[in-house]
Amino acid sequence: MLIILMSVQSASAENINIVDVYSDIDSTDITIHSGEHYTDITLKAELIFKGNVLETKQFYLDEVSSDTDITKIAFWELKNPKEGFYRTRMAMSMDGSVLETRYYNFSYGWQAMPGVTIKDIVPDSSGISIILAPYTTKIGPKPVLADVEYMLVNGDTVIYRTTDRRVTVVQATPLLKDWNVLLENNHDYSTRVKARISSPKDAVIAQSKDFTSKDDVRITELYRDETGASATVEGYSQVPFDGYVVFTVTKDDTLIEEVREKSPVLTNSDDETIEIIWSRKLAAGIYGLSVEVIGNDGDILDMWDTVIESDYDSSADATPEPTPTETPGFGIIPATIALVLLYLSSGQTRRNG
């Protein structure tokens, strides 16, 4: 039985492995790869300083699909970290048995400057923008090549990741990535950026930032006349937009017409033109037109105010009054008299004959 259990554990360890580990004084992440379907996996992260475990984080995976990478992220909560040498220990267990252990060492407070720095991170519901800059020496910036990894995190799990490889960083370099997964409205997410350089020596830096996802749609084009109007709206979020476009016509502060039109579902970079027709043409004059995009929560996402100048002459379409016709009752009498006279005349003619 012992030999069988050892062989099963060995087989399991070969088909599920820790493939990447990173840690600094603020956070840590671990990536595992599973070649088969497994259940009941536990990942344990320990932050160690001078042989003492300062913090412990655990992740529980009820199920892992075949041929899958899973990345988990945790944030350390040290209030007053001391300068020195730290070690993070990662252990993966299945059914209570440790399958693999990995370590990541780093220093805090007096570590060598990395070849690049992440100057700024701005995440939102469409993607993430960062500025990556090289380390500057006395003689100026030192160009480097970096692999930049962008992660979208839901809770403690990375749900989307993509990498720019061999990015040339000669000066402050802006980079942008879109999320290619759908997001929930009014949901809290985290983003994580890792930059890795291999020259002159291997170094990795990471930085994280939170954001709350929102639906976002903007008006990009507008057409209007006395007959109707159309608005082109474009999505700027991976939260599906399922709202309305409202067209409101006024004249001298008086509401003339309001049309509320349902928009097709839009996500980032999608655009659609919504067309409407007024219930009747607007008579000659100047009107105010307000177009509002109403979001999933009923809030106004965008607005466009303009005017409609109409030269339409409403009298031109007026139906002409019909020409009066003779009333049938008044035409009967002359016709009857004529028939009587004709009859009498024909009778007189017969008598004479």
Image (spheres, rainbow, N blue to C red):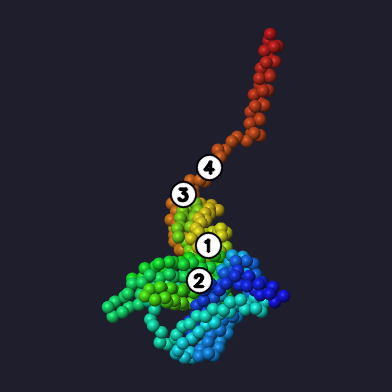
Contact, mark 1 vs mark 3 (Cβ under 8 Å)? no
Give coordinates of residue 251: x percent, y percent: 48, 61
Q: Quadrant of residue 195?
A: bottom left
Helix, strand or loop status at disc 1: loop
Q: CA distance from mark 3 to mark 2?
A: 61 Å
Contact, mark 4 vs mark 1 (Cβ under 8 Å)? no
Give whichever of 307, 61 is nearer the camera: 61
Dot 1 or dot 2: first in sequence order is 2
Q: CA distance from mark 2 to mark 4?
A: 71 Å
The amino acid on which the numbered mark 1 sits, given as a three-letter code, is: Thr
Disc 3 or disc 2, which is closer to the eye? 2
Q: CA distance from mark 4 to mark 1?
A: 52 Å
Q: Would residue 275 be seen by someone viewing this image from the given angle?
A: yes
The amino acid on which the numbered mark 3 sits, given as a three-letter code, is: Asp
**Which residue does the numbered mark 3 point to in the structure image?**
313
The amino acid on which the numbered mark 4 sits, given as a three-letter code, is: Pro
Q: CA distance from mark 1 to mark 2?
A: 20 Å
Q: Which residue is pictured at 66% across the width and 17% down the height?
A: 345
Q: CA distance from mark 1 to mark 3?
A: 42 Å
Q: Which residue is pictured at 46% across the width and 77% down the height?
A: 206
Give whichever of 209, 133 is nearer the camera: 133
Q: Which mark is residue 151?
A: 2
Give coordinates of residue 307: x percent, y percent: 44, 59
Helix, strand or loop status at disc 3: loop
Dot 4 or dot 1: first in sequence order is 1
Q: Which residue is pictured at 57% across the width and 63% down the height?
A: 242
